[in-house]
Image (spheres, rainbow, N blue to C red):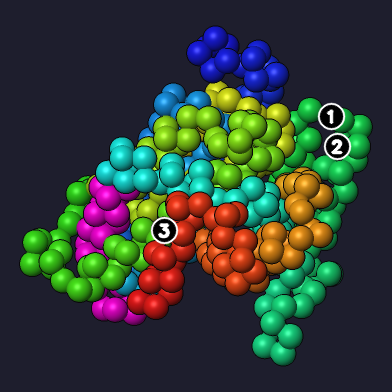
Amino acid sequence: MSSFFAIKESGSKVRTEILAGITTFLTMAYILAVNPDILSAAGLPRDSVFVATAIASAIATLVMAFVARLPFALAPGMGLNAFFAFTVVLGMGKSWQFALTAVLLEGIIFLLLTAFNVREAIINCIPSNVRKAISVGIGLFIALIGLNNAGLIVGSDATLVQLGNLGSPGVILTIIGLVIIAVLLAFKVRGALLIGIVVVTLVGIPMNVTNVEGFKLFGGVPSLSPVFFKFVGLKEILTWEMLLVVFTFLFVDMFDTVGTLIGVSTKAGITRPDGSIPRVKGALFADAIGTTAGSMLGTSTVTTYVESAAGVEEGGRTGLTALVTAILFLIAIPFSSLFLLIPSAATAPALILVGLFMMSPVKEIEWTEITEALPAFLAIIMMPLAYSIAEGIVWGILSFIAVKLLTGKVRDLNVGICIVGVFLVLSLIF
């Protein structure tokens, strides 16, 4: 196992990789509860979607583990599942079977694009300073998710966002978690994030934040049959609406995955000297296979998760981290009640601190050159403000092309980035 995953060569240990895999799983286990809730609004049975979510996540993450051998985990993407339920089904009035068919087509197209190295070429053409900015932007985005999950930052009609109720049990518990993990990190305790999550979950029981009511260790395995392989016919496939939905899934998932791979790989220090990611083609196949399999099982688009950064921060550097996470997704199926005990107040401190750790590349960005600094800044700031990794990348790339052209620095542009820019402009227009 050590030889296959090249654990020693990566400067890691088996114990470290296992802890990292557990940490990654715990920070993203919320998807097992949230995804069924969102897709059930579109009419899919919640229990069946839970099983589909767990299996699809495990399949995609296993591909990441054994093919790419990278420490990243995958699951149905947040935002993409909301588009599935609230835009395609409830907004456009389409059936959930129509939406699942769109996800299937997206997965097949991704498989083809990956096989012909199109997606890999997109990753490799992104400029160095924008790459570093993506990591920083994702850090702010992750921190915002954690702060919002905790109730520390909430929405406001008057000021867009505002400070939450500091007296609420969830907020108090999150602050306790931040202090615990920070102290553990200060003393360089291995598994600090994981220990913090477990301790906060236990402390949350007497505070009525961790809900143990009706808890059963073994809950049985719901049937997949209500959602398994439920697709529409050719008549509905050959429509403008289907083309529009498939394109939207493609666009958002493409740049969410690209951004996450670049950002977390940069933080992990596993990129090559030229900035490229080793075995990135295998990583791209993971989300393509996961999305295709997920549509057949009955869930929305599968993508690489930014929460993988939590495992990377715990020292995860190889595919063994992903393997452990995948196994836990499968274990979660019969023991769903146990994993769903973990409240957002327990995972929020870990996400906030991961956001902090991902800020480090900001000092390497060329801030004194405006044609490099502006695109980097826009990529960073638009991710949390637009609540989208994809939007941050769009603003970063398009502004980079624009300022380079307008200042006569055409030599700083490559063919790949120009082609990507054309497609991004077309996507904004249509």
| Residue 243: numbered disc | none
On whether residue 270 falls in the magenta region, the answer is no
Instruction: Identify the secondary structure beneath mark 3.
Output: helix
The boundaries of the magenta stretch are 89-110
Q: Residue at x 15, y 64 (%)?
A: 237
- Of circles 2 and 3, the one toward us is 3
Residue labelled with disc 3? 419
Q: Could you say which is closer to the camera, residue 126 or residue 430?
A: 126
Precedes in sequence: disc 1 or disc 3: 1
- 269 left or right of 111 in image: right
Q: Position of residue 302 (x, y in %)?
A: 41, 49
Circles 1, 2 touching at the beta carbon (< 8 Å): yes
| Residue 185: numbered disc | 2
The prevailing secondary structure element of the residues shown in magenta is helix
Q: Residue at x 66, y 40 (%)?
A: 266
Q: Could you say which is closer to the camera, residue 323 or residue 216?
A: 323
Q: Could you say which is closer to the camera, residue 266 or residue 350?
A: 266
- Of circles 1 and 3, the one toward us is 3
Residue labelled with disc 1? 189
Q: Badge 3 local density, few (<14 within 10 Å), some, or many (20+)?
A: few
Q: Amino acid at mark 2?
A: Leu
Circles 2, 3 touching at the beta carbon (< 8 Å): no
